[in-house]
Image (cartoon, helix red, strand yellow):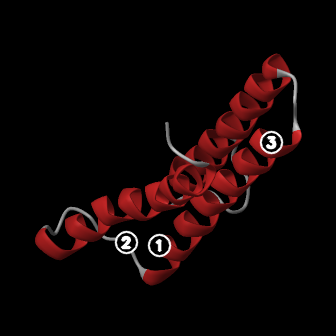
Amino acid sequence: MMVQKQKTLTMYALPLALLCIPLLGNLFSDEVNWSASDFLIAGILLFTTVFLISVVRNKIRKQSHRILLCIFILLTLVLIWLELAVGIFGSPFKGS
């Protein structure tokens, strides 16, 4: 069983690993065209999500509430990501 510090380290390493995917795409392909601001925004979104899930895991005691809050946090991440990528809601900060 992993200790709490190892779980936390693993959780915070996951966004870095996910950000390596578009970085490698940028380096080796012309199809992926992320700017530094794209990486910054993606990093903020991913690290904020991990931080909020970590807070929920540590502060909320009831398992069902924890699961619902984590699902809500992940759903919010997906909706914001989709809005930034393709503009599903038509907001002013939608993707081009």
Q: How far apart are marks 2 and 1 (CA)?
A: 7 Å
From the viewer's perspective, tell me whether residue 12 is left or right of residue 71: left
Say few, some or many: other residues with alpha carbon within 10 Å of mark 1 (under 14 / 14 to 19 / 20 or more): some
Q: Name the residue under label 2.
A: 34
Q: Kindly check if marks 2 and 1 are in contact, taking CB atoms under 8 A apart as contact.
A: yes
Q: Kindly check if marks 3 and 2 are in contact, taking CB atoms under 8 A apart as contact.
A: no
- From the viewer's perspective, is residue 18 above or below residue 53? below
Q: Where is residue 19 in the image (x, y as percent from the top left)?
A: 39, 63
What secondary structure is found at the residue carrying circle 3? helix
Q: Which mark is residue 4?
A: none
**Which residue is pictured at 79% across the width and 50% down the height?**
55
Tag 1 or tag 3, which sits nearer the N-term?
1
What secondary structure is found at the residue carrying circle 1? helix
In front: label 2 or label 1: 1
Q: Position of residue 51 (x, y in %)?
A: 70, 57
In front: label 3 or label 1: 3
Q: Mark 3 points at which residue?
A: 56
Q: Which mark is residue 39?
A: 1
What type is the residue that disc 1 sits on?
Answer: Phe
- Residue 88 in view here: no
**Which residue is pictured at 68% across the width and 62% down the height?**
93
